[in-house]
Amino acid sequence: MKNTCFFIVMFMIMTQGSYGQIFEQKFEFFNYGDRISKYIKADDPGNSKFTYISSNGTQRSGIINGGLLRFVKTGPASAQLVKSGKFNANSDFLYISFSYRISENESVHPNDKQAFFFVGDGFSNDAKLPDDAKNVHSKFSFHYTGSGKFKVSDNQNNLSDEFSGEQQITFVINNTGKDQFYTAPNKSKEKLANDKWDLWIGENKVFDEREVVSPDVPLSGFKFHVQAHAINGMTDLGNFVVHNLETLSKSQRKREIIENSQYVAYRKSFVATKRWLQIPVKNKATKRGVRIDVDGKWFRNFSVELANETPDWYAYVDINEIKGKAFTMSVDSLPFNSSAFANIKQLDEKPKDELLYHEKYRGQIHYSVKNGCSTDANGMTFYNGEYHLFYQHNPYGTRWGNMHWGHAVSKDLVHWKELDIAIYPDELGDPFSGGGVVDVGNTSGLSKTGKDPMILYYTATGIPRTQTLAYSTDGRTFEKLGRSVLKGVSPFNRDPKVLWHEPSKKWIMVLYVEEKGELHTMRFFNSTNMIDWEETSVYVGGKGQDRYMYECPEFYELPVEGNPNERKWILVCADGQYAIGTFNGREFKAEQERLQSVIGKGYYASQQFSNEPKGRKVEMGWFRTNTDQVNMNFSQSFSIPMEIKLVRTSQGLRIVRIPVEEFKSLRKEHSTYKNEVISRSLTKDIRSEVYELEAIIQPQQASQLTINIRGVIFTYMPSSGKLVYKDQTIDLPLENGKLKIHAFVDKASVELFVNDGLVFIPVNANLDARNTRLVFNTTGSEALVEQLDVYKLESIW
């Protein structure tokens, strides 16, 4: 949304009771992370005014009723909370919002962003605005408290549906892409342009007969006036009044408002009597802000594609810890005719889903969440006889958001069991990515049971961003430290990885930090107690779109295969790029840099299991399988587990990825083929959607070799020694004239390992169940399949 006018802005706050006293409050400029959560409270707990002055001298003002005021100056890549200052028309964009409440004792929470507007030309989609600045524009709402049943009518007596109790009325321009109409004075219908309107009440005023809303105004008969503020001016939407149903005539009760033209923010009270609160979800519906409050404090706060009618699936909120208590659930805006609340129920147990793990595109050899979205692998640890996989998880939708730490466990790295959410958002912010470790010897002192704790480090996304931790002695319940162990070293920092360094007898933390000019760095810290950290060095990566050493670090030591006395440290970033070098406990020195063994963009943010019982370096990563694109109730998955080794090649030291031995337990039907000639084409119909294949191929004199696995095509150029997948190319010389491939094929993916894992190509593709073929093609001459082994695989579920 771009305004055509540019404002040089100054702001003043005046108390309602003393208009003659005008004073200016100044803000210090500061940078921030990906979102803003700090609010500036108005001086007067009653009614306050704010004023801004445009460059042409026009003065505008608005009223804040005992609320919160926020001003954000932002450009394409940053934002600052401001109060006064000059703005550059070409690069700056101003976001202003305020929130108010009618009831003086009612708390305002993040879903109560009531009114806002934008100033300046510098806004772009790259601007790091708060999430709500992008998602909740075109909305005005206010709270009221009422004891009876009510309806809202406009100046033409069009009536809303019935509502009652303490709620919040919201007027919204719908962003569904459909034309929206509001009844306006002296007009039959006023057509509004989607995504170009902000709703105001007067000049940000709510009017009754005394012109200012106060807590003692009765709800019944309460009058207000609505205007839509567009880029080119104001449009009246009409006068509105709240009616008590008992005073309305039958004819009035039958009148209906224009469908979808008005929304209400619902609030409903419950008593927690069961374990789960069921939330209806409609994939790709408009996101709604939901908040659950207990004893006047927020318990859960999330956005969800709330189903107004028939849901696609249900999300579940665990309310066991508040059982027996009253709680209030608020939704920021819903159509008047929404049936969403009819589907919000309490349950002792989640209903059994007969289709679970048998969905059309559910991976059968890859772990994925039951419902919702998973992304970065987090906190991977072997503890209490189990492999613990944590991950970034949105339990309320199939797209990124609402970051929690999901949790799954396995005894064999093959079969996984999804557990309850391990870490929820809290006052410190959302729990972003981080690592896990077993505190052998309880150096942190956090365990009071005599058992070594598992400790999970993560980034909390408040302002400033901080690193904090949670710990457990049973692998199921997690206690948060509740404070920072390392405060933000810059506005953009995240993803702490912690490990033990035996030679120095210290804990090491590697943290991604973005410095000025979008410079990507990894900073190193050490500690003796896991709580107090000292910075020791910085390793510098790329800049801007050069993502070398961009986020999600992994750091480990390996011996060179065949020479156990030669050991090297490997530093890896989110996209799989890595460096090999030495580490003395304080500083990493690279000897080889910018190495890459992953082709494509299907694999990201991998980690290794700490405390692995066999001493292996076992890696799993976020596998970007896009099942949400085919309307599944889950999205994304994780790679198969792979052992990482360090080998010496003709090009120097390189890491290789080898599927773990445990995966051989899934093999069932086995077919083998030897010395088969590829004369232009060779086809094998596997007749299974899920299989493993191993092949040794001699390209011989062929100028090109293609390997087509269920429609996923890889191309090898023997003369240049290049392997190609789509637009990605990597150098891969033949080994003794041979190309070795090892692939795992699933319903929505193919993972290809080439030349004993020297190259890894993870492909996310929702595959056609009718195509189970494996096809080899050559150009220029024949090639030879020296050996081909195919195994149909059992499901891990």
Image: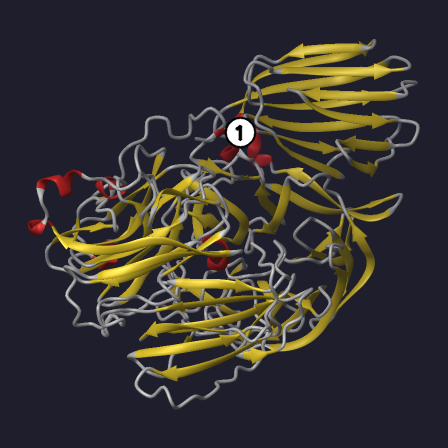
Residue 670 picture quarter? top right
Q: Position of residue 441 (x, y in %)?
A: 48, 69
Residue 275 appears left or right of 603: left
User: Residue drawn 69% across and 41% down?
Assistant: 657
Query: Which quadrant of the figure contains the N terminus?
Result: bottom right
Task: Compare residues 214 and 521 and report the one nearer the observer.
Answer: 214
Does residue 455 show up? no
User: Residue drawn 12% across and 39% down?
Assistant: 251
Query: Which quadrant of the figure contains the C terminus?
Result: top left
User: Residue drawn 47% across and 43% down?
Assistant: 373
Residue 271 appears left or right of 630: left
Does residue 677 show up? yes
Residue 733 picture quarter? top right
Q: Position of residue 692 (x, y in %)?
A: 62, 24
List the single residue furthest toward the left: 246
Residue 650, above or below 143 = above
Residue 785, above or below 379 = above
Residue 486 picture quarter? bottom right
User: Residue drawn 25% across and 58% down?
Assistant: 321
Give the residue number, with chain letter if any, for mark 1.
Answer: 665
Residue 263, above or below 585 = above
Residue type pointed to by label 1:
Ser
Q: Position of residue 700 (x, y in %)?
A: 90, 19
Q: Position of residue 308 (x, y in %)?
A: 31, 39
Task: Compare residues 147 and 202 and report the one nearer the observer.
Answer: 202
Task: Compare residues 272 and 1 and report the one nearer the observer.
Answer: 1
The colour scheme applied to this rendered structure is secondary structure
Q: How many residues crowd around disc 1 within 10 Å: few (fewer than 14), some, or many (20 or more)? A: few
**Dot 1: what SS?**
helix
List the single residue furthest toward the bottom: 21
Residue 609 appears left or right of 113: right
